[in-house]
Image (tube, rainbow, N blue to C red):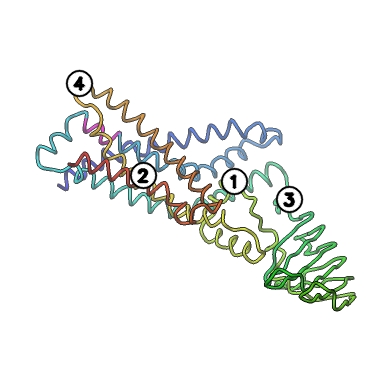
Amino acid sequence: MKKVDRYVLSEFLQPLALVVLGLAVLILLVQMVDQLPHLRSYKPSLSQELSFYLFQFPYFVTQVLPVGVMLATLIGLGGLARNSELTALSAGGVSRARVALPVLLAALAISGALLLVSETLVPGASARARYIQKVQIEKRDVDYDQFWRDHMAKNLPGRRQLYTVNFDAKNGTMQALVVMAYDANGALQRRLDAAGAHWAQDTRWVLSKGVERVFDAAGRETSTRYFESWPEDLGASPSDFMVDSDKREEDLMQLNIAQLDAIIARLRTTGGDARREQVCRALRISYPFSCFILALLGVGLPYLFPTGKRALTGAAMGLVASLVCGMLYLVFIQVGFSLGTSSHLPVTLSAWLGNLVFGALGLGVLWRVNS
């Protein structure tokens, strides 16, 4: 069986690199058509353009790899089916599930490699691509992300809320701010109004030229105190306040798990909604295993379509079925993401929805053709 395993594995691996490379290049070309007019308006050098797309390429490869694995599975096993080699193996007592085993083990190894690359290579390469675009091509400052906020509202630890007319993270200052604290029933307990504030250290700030007012349970003001300077622990530093839930899903998926954990922790500290980041974190773990899931579905498809004299028809049908399944899988990923971020599904279930559905479908197909 070792010779058979090696032969089946070689039939799977030979088209894999070509298919993945072709799909990744296709996405790259689409991105170039979409982005080049904007980039060319800044008159970049050829080396800057090439570097920008070169550092984006690893992310494109990770996105197309699962579909590439499924297509390579179909091409490899489909070729064996067209040459009647699968029929010969079945006649020799080799079950169809056993023929699929080396492909499935290889797909599982590819899933692990994809997870590793997504955690190590992709975040750094994507960050470099963004740096080339924002700093080298668009000539922005190194801190190219907007470091100020107008009319910023944040939830703070201890049932508190903050509102400021202007927040400057670079200088650690706020202008015209209000801090309100509430009791467990939602009644206002304390309010701080200040003309400004500056960051001291850690999560401590110093408010200036303001007034503190304290209220009882009935909402009556019980004390008033004016101040020139007032130290207050807001539970967040300037960098914590800069974390927003306005990143695109694509940007979040280019971060590694540790970076997503840091964003989630900061959003929780400042009272933000971190559910989308939590779903993206779960997807960072579940998506690499789609290589195995789609391979599981792909190993059964060659047995469902015509062979022999109608082999070309069967190959065409298999190709269409693979593309449709790949697109449907991506649809399920998006549906799960939407249901997860809207709290209609638990975070983990929403991230694994596509894998669960297509894994069950793959097992069903393999069981049917094996029996």
Q: Position of residue 14 (x, y in %)?
A: 31, 38
As drawn, the label of residue 309 is 4
Q: Residues within 10 Å of mark 3 (few under 14, many from 20)?
A: few
Give the image quarter of residue 169.
bottom right
Answer whether residue 124 is visible to the viewer in this image.
Answer: no
Mark 1 = which residue? 129
**Which amino acid lies under the numbered mark 1 shown in the image of this protein?**
Ala
Which residue corresponds to mark 2? 358
Alpha-carbon distance for marks 4 and 3? 65 Å
Residue numbers of the magenta segment:
75-81
Magenta span contains residue 293: no
Which residue matches tag 3?
141
Q: Main secondary structure of the magenta part?
A: helix
Secondary structure of the residue carrying numbered label 3: loop
Q: Which type of secondary structure does the marked residue at label 2 adopt?
A: helix
Q: Nearer the viewer, mark 4 or mark 3?
A: 4
x and y percentages locating residue 161 in the rendered image:
73, 65
| Left or right: where 304 falls relative to 198 | left
Closer to the camera in the image, 317 or 67:
317
The C terminus, quarter of image = top left
Q: Residue at x 49, y 42 (%)?
A: 60
User: Can see residue 279?
Assistant: yes
| Mark 3 or mark 2: whose residue is earlier in sequence | 3
Give me the C-alpha separation between circle 3 and circle 2: 46 Å
